[in-house]
Amino acid sequence: MYLIDTYAWIEYFIGSKRGEKVKEIIENEDNIILTPECCLAEIKGWSIRENMDFDELYSIVRKISDVQCVITQDWLDAASIRSEMRKTMKDFGMIDALIIAQQKRMGCKIVSGDPHFEGSKDVVFT
């Protein structure tokens, strides 16, 4: 099981070299692909800035992955994770903490190129 974050989706959409690694993961039929719902807002924001068709991108995400709703416990766990991470990474954000909370709850790996996740356990860094 793989949780695909915004960074990884964008690399996939633009067809970058990093996106090739994402493509290998999401197009492997043996893999279960998940997307945190909070990433949809970030993807939409990126699509607006880049003048891309969000509906088309959203359709791709929905076709390839199962969008995971954020539950209350994810938010509560994310607050603790963010607090802990900020001891060593001052700019660690709540969305990144939320992704880690979901990853822990679901027992999967995160796929990301976000520097906040580099070197972290259970992260496939693209």
Image (cartoon, rainbow, N blue to C red):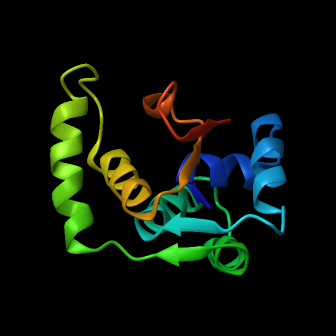
Q: In this view, does 65 lie to the left or right of 86?
A: right
Query: Residue 91 location, x and y as percent?
Result: 28, 29
Return the x and y of residue 41 as percentages of the image width and height: 44, 66
Q: In this view, does 34 lie above or below 120?
A: below
In percent of the image, x 60 and y 36: which residue is there? 113
Residue closest to the eye, 89 or 11: 89
Where does the C terminus fall, quadrant-wise? top right
| Quadrant housing residue 59 | bottom right
Q: In which quarter of the image is the N terminus?
A: bottom right
With respect to residue 102, does 112 lie above or below? Answer: above
Residue 70 horizontal/vertical position (percent): 33, 72
Q: Is residue 104 left or right of residue 32?
A: left
Residue 121 screen position, x and y as percent = 48, 34
Q: Which residue is drawn at 27% across and 48% down?
A: 94
Residue 13 shown left or right of residue 24 in the figure? left
How many numbered callouts?
0
